[in-house]
Amino acid sequence: MASRNFKSGFRRVVLDREPSQLAGFRFAIAIAVLLLAAAARAQSQTVASRIERSAALIGENKLAEAEQELNGVLKIAPNSAGALDLLGTVRAQQGKLAEAEALFRRALSIDSRLVGAHMNLAYLYMLQGAPIKTVSELKEVLRLEPNNSEATYKLARLELTQGQIDECIELLERVSSSGRASPPLIVMLGDAYLRKGNAAKAEERYLMALNQQEDSQGALLGLAQVSHLKGDSRSVSLYLARSRELAGSSPDLLYSFATVALRVSAVEEARSAVEQAIKVRPEEPAYFIALGAIWLNKSDVFEAEQAFRRALQLDPDNAQAQMMLGYALLKQKKYPEARAYLEKSTAVEAVAAEALYYLGLIAEEQSEDTRAVELLEKAIRLSPSLPYAHVALGSSYLKLKNYTRAQQELEVAVKLIPDEPKVHYQLALLYARLKDPARSQEEMRIVEKLKGTSEGTGKGNIIIIPTPPNPR
């Protein structure tokens, strides 16, 4: 399925007017052609023109002709970094990712400043679910070209999705202070502040983006989330309505609308949007993952399971679908099958921490507390801010009567999710074991208070918000 994503990403990015996660190889090839023009002085005119022709053929999706042309170039100039980079692009679109990576690496060994090859590697690693490698390549692009807006957007987005909120804010504030921040980057800065819990700064950035671009769906969705935090349901409805109108029949915009509608508890609106997106683009597995997440939020585990299975029919190697299906099976206590899917998904860095957390829950459910501790500690090493992993680990330590470690983990958890009743319940149990009835009773009062409000999630697991589709 990776080859499908490479091809569609390559074709569609030319249609994007703003930097976005959907950008792919067209951008890298455009850079390569510009670099080749500068390098023409050092090469024969024949070689330079043939490389430019190859880039044009790739742009027209004539991969066989492009490959033939590039092989001819490499017979004449075997150390042409530009030709190797473009041949890597061909291999990537053919689904031969290992060969593509080797070609990009070879191009960079000849010319380490070839920005196009670094961007192509970043995109390849993104598709493979390897965020650490992706970040490394994007940072190298920005070292070579500090004003590269595409690399800035991708790096900031990746840092945001990986929970590196402070790094994301630092990067985007630096861009903003230089006057180079586009509305999408300003929206992302608002998203980062929202994730950090600073609703005031988030709202300020969203309004700034909306002032620059009145049809910014991202800004409207951000303001809907801020209004939800304020308890202003009327404003939530107004912002969602404007955003839904802007989405029209665009599956990508419908998907974006659905993810935020789910966050602000507009579950039916989210489901309607995703189902419409599926009608327009039924071959996109991410939309079925989103639909499954929505069914989970409606507590319909069977429908969620069917949606995740459909995603895996479309993309059998989709680690997120494997992980989500494993979670749905876990909820049904189908532990052997759940474990099988979750263990598969741990091989992919992007979802490994969450999958290990769910495996830890299975071990905990089956009274394998020592095994649960091992899995949960591994999950936390991969993602220290994964809140419910700390809750589960604290619970496991409590069962093992390691009260010092239980208290450490639960205190971390209560800082991350102060309005989660389960954390306070576990703390109440802990203080009771430590023979501190006053603190135990205080924690139980907090539990009762949260149960009586809309603040507590009471789910004892991760709030499931689907990640964006693979870059197309």
Image (cartoon, rainbow, N blue to C red):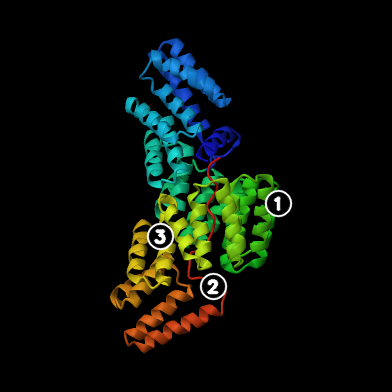
Type of amino acid at the residue the image marks with label 3 = Leu
Q: Earlier in the sequence, mark 2 or mark 1?
A: 1
Sequence order check: which comes first, mark 1 or mark 3? Answer: 1
Check if mark 3's residue and mark 2's residue have beta carbons within 8 Å: no
Between marks 3 and 2, how big is the CA–CA gap?
Answer: 27 Å
**Mark 1 element type:** helix
Q: Residue at x 57, y 67 (%)?
A: 230
Q: Is residue 402 above or below residue 128?
A: below
* Position in image of residue 454 (x %, y %): 57, 74
Q: Which residue is mark 1?
A: 245
Q: Residue at left 50%, top 54%?
A: 322
Specify few, some or many for label 3: CA neighbours under 10 Å numbering under 14, 14-19, or 20 or more. Answer: many
Q: Which residue is mark 3?
A: 356
Tag shown at residue 321: none
Look at discs 1 and 3 and give the one toward the viewer. 3
| Kind of residue sitting beneath label 1 | Glu
Identify the residue position indicated by label 2 in the image: 455
Q: Give the residue at x 52% y 47%.
A: 316
Distance of label 2 from label 1 (alpha carbons)? 29 Å
Q: Give the percent coordinates (x, y) of residue 215.
A: 65, 47
Q: Residues within 10 Å of mark 2 (few under 14, many from 20)?
A: some
Where residue 295 sits, quadrant-wise, is: bottom right
